Image (cartoon, rainbow, N blue to C red):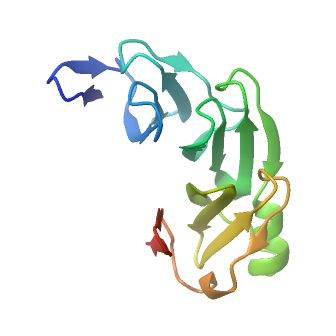
Amino acid sequence: AAARDDTGIQYHLAGIPVEDIVPDPSDPKTALALTGGRKPGLHRTTDAGKTWRDVTPPFGPECAAIDPAASRTLVAAGYEGGFARSTDGGISWKTGSIGDAAASTMMKGVLKNVRALAFSGKRLLAAGGQGDGFAAASDDDGATWTALDWSEGWGYNWALAVAKNALLVGG
């Protein structure tokens, strides 16, 4: 996999298939790469892709986001609602679950795969699905999650973006 900057120089995360690149909204030299293959992972660069450091949380993440207000704060989520948050650039992680919120408040006992994360100011948003879609919000750094009422039954939610006055969810 490769990334290209505005100078046309190409950088490689050699030998590892990259499924998604998450740029840091406040630092153009910092990004996350979600890697796939047999062992999903998360890698971070702070030098525009010249070097990458493995910052994979205790589970293989499906999605990740960087806090626009704090570049060293990373969040990752994945299969069955696994969630992790790091405030030191991925050196250490605190884990939790979005799946618990999904199971108890959204899907009546069915855990969900989290496929997208986004920050909206201090609020953290998550979306995903496994048969039916869901979206959830956390106002306490991912410690607790609340279902967004309108999201149940939307199918698979694979993308999430925050616009000026709107939340965009796609599947």
**Of 115 and 69, which appears nearest the observer?**
69
Image quarter where the N terminus lies is: top left
Q: How many marks?
A: 0
Left or right? Give the position of 44 relative to 149: left
At a point 18% along the width and 19% down the height, the residue shown is 9
At a point 75% along the width and 79% down the height, the residue shown is 106
The x, y position of residue 110, in whole percent, is 75, 73
Is residue 157 among what the camera can see? Answer: yes
Image quarter where the C terminus lies is: bottom left
Left or right? Give the position of 85 relative to 116: right
The x, y position of residue 42, in whole percent, is 55, 31
At a point 57% along the width and 20% down the height, the residue shown is 54
Q: Is residue 138 above or below residue 54?
A: below
Left or right? Give the position of 91 relative to 115: right
Is residue 39 among what the camera can see? Answer: no
Point out the residue furthest to the left here: 8
Q: Is residue 17 above or below residue 13?
A: below
- Asked where in the image residue 87 lies, by quadrant, the reply is top right
The x, y position of residue 43, in whole percent, is 52, 26
Point out the residue furthest to the top here: 51
Q: Is residue 34 above or below residue 156?
A: above
**Of 162 and 156, which appears nearest the observer?**
162
The x, y position of residue 100, in whole percent, is 83, 63
At a point 82% along the width and 55% down the height, the residue shown is 140
- Asked where in the image residue 76 lies, by quadrant, the reply is top right
- Asked where in the image residue 51 lies, by quadrant, the reply is top left
